[in-house]
């Protein structure tokens, strides 16, 4: 079972659907707006991280980048409502 983490964004239904189409069955979402979210424990056993730029605070984004790099996870960055480029990125990032 492939797992993904979406960081940022308020309404991530389009991204969830796209991840499901790529075979990701378990998708967690961190809204990324509150400062306290920076202290959340990073989930283990995930296969992909998607960061919604413009919807996440800088500290959380930096922490997620660091943890994804440390665990050698693929990380995708998506702008506001740009699901077409996300489809292309997901196709290339599938493990």
Image: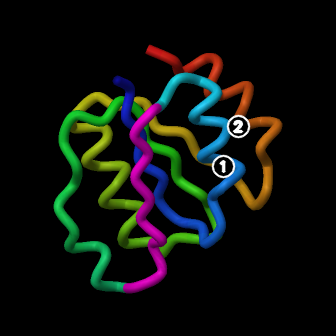
Image mark count: 2
Q: Nearer the viewer, residue 90 or 3?
A: 3
Q: Residue under label 2, please give it.
A: 86
Q: For residue 22, which quarter of the picture?
A: top right
Taken as a whole, is the magenta stretch helix, strand or loop? strand
Residue 37: image location, x then y, percent: 31, 76
Residue 85: image location, x then y, percent: 77, 36
Pointer 2 with pointer 1, Cβ within 8 A: yes
Q: Nearer the viewer, residue 55 or 70?
A: 55
Q: Quadrant of the C terminus?
A: top left
Residue 56: image location, x then y, percent: 52, 70
Q: For residue 76, which quarter of the picture?
A: top right
Return the disc, 2 or 1, that comes first in the chain's sequence: 1
Residue drawn at point x = 66 percent, y = 41 percent:
17
Residue 47: image location, x then y, percent: 35, 30
Q: Quadrant of the N terminus?
A: top left
Question: Residue 81, relative to residue 15: is it above or below?
Answer: below
Q: Quote the CA–CA distance across marks 2 and 1.
A: 6 Å
Question: Residue 11, relative to residue 79: is it above or below?
Answer: below
Q: Residue under label 1, please give it.
A: 78
Question: Residue 88, relative to residue 83: is it above or below?
Answer: above
Q: Which residues are magenta?
A: 25-34
Q: Based on the picture, tell me whether residue 29 belongs to the magenta stretch.
A: yes
Q: Is residue 19 left or right of residue 73?
A: right
Residue drawn at point x = 40 percent, y = 52 percent:
28
Q: Nearer the viewer, residue 70 or 12?
A: 12
Q: Is residue 8 left or right of residue 92?
A: left
């Amino acid at each position: 079972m492939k797992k993904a983490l979406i960081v940022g964004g308020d309404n991530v239904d389009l991204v969830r659907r796209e991840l499901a189409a790529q075979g990701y069955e378990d998708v967690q979402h961190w809204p990324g707006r509150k400062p306290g979210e920076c202290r959340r424990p990073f989930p283990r056993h995930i296969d992909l991280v998607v960061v919604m730029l413009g919807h996440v605070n800088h500290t959380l984004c930096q922490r997620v980048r660091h943890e994804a790099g440390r665990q050698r996870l693929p990380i995708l960055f998506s702008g506001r409502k740009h699901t077409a480029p996300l489809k292309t990125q997901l196709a290339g990032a599938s493990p």
